[in-house]
Image (tube, rainbow, N blue to C red):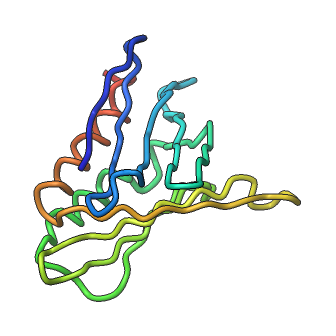
């Protein structure tokens, strides 16, 4: 389930909660931009015993779009074979999608791996399960609105 949130300081965010375990979540928040070519935002992963955050994920206007990836998954709500994936240009955020039939669910594995070239880098991931149709379409719309808001 996704929730577009507005906090007390009017900062937009999007939270994705796993329908199988509500304590597993991904949050997009703290969006800002320096110029018209990019949007910067934070991504937080939460699960029992895990809290991970990358403060400056960058979405460039010329990169493949996360929302287009999510919209394609929503369009293919009847399923697909194998795994599909998307990543930011510098690969600090990666999303992998797997389809589970028998109810039409999509497992989204959200992986954070900042500083991949630096010594002492780290990585963390969580998997959220959503309904393949309506919940995926809602997620795509919420993420599109979140990323586009600074450009409006």
The answer to which quarter of the image holds residue 117 is bottom right
Q: Nearer the viewer, residue 60 or 67?
A: 67
- Snapshot quadrant of residue 93: bottom right
Q: Position of residue 39 (x, y in %)?
A: 49, 34
Across and down, in percent, residue 90 comes to 63, 55
| Image coords of residue 84 (percent x, y) | 37, 75
Q: Is residue 39 above or below residue 54?
A: above
* Residue furthest front as drawn: 48
Residue situated in front as seen by the camera: 28 or 130: 130
28 horizontally vs 122: left or right: left
Q: Residue at coordinates 50% horizontally, 49% vertically from top-left?
A: 46
Residue drawn at the location 54% of the way across and 37% of the way down = 42
Above or below 8: residue 113: below
Q: Quadrant of the C terminus?
A: top left
Which one is in front, 41 or 88? 41
Residue drawn 27% across and 33% down?
A: 4
């Amino acid at each position: 389930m996704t929730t577009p949130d507005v906090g007390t300081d009017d900062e937009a965010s999007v939270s994705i909660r796993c329908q199988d375990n509500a304590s597993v979540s991904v949050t997009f928040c703290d969006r800002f931009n320096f110029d018209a070519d990019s949007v910067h935002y934070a991504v937080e992963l939460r699960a029992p015993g895990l809290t991970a955050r990358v403060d400056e994920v960058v979405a460039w206007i010329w990169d493949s779009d996360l929302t287009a990836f999510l919209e394609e998954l929503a369009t293919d709500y009847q399923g697909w074979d194998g795994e599909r994936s998307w990543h930011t240009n510098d690969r600090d955020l990666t999303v992998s999608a797997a389809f589970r039939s028998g109810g039409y669910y999509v497992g989204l594995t959200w992986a954070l791996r900042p500083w991949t070239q630096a010594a002492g880098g780290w990585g963390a991931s969580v998997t959220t399960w959503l309904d393949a149709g309506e919940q995926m379409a809602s997620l795509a719309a919420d993420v599109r609105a979140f990323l586009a808001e600074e450009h409006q």
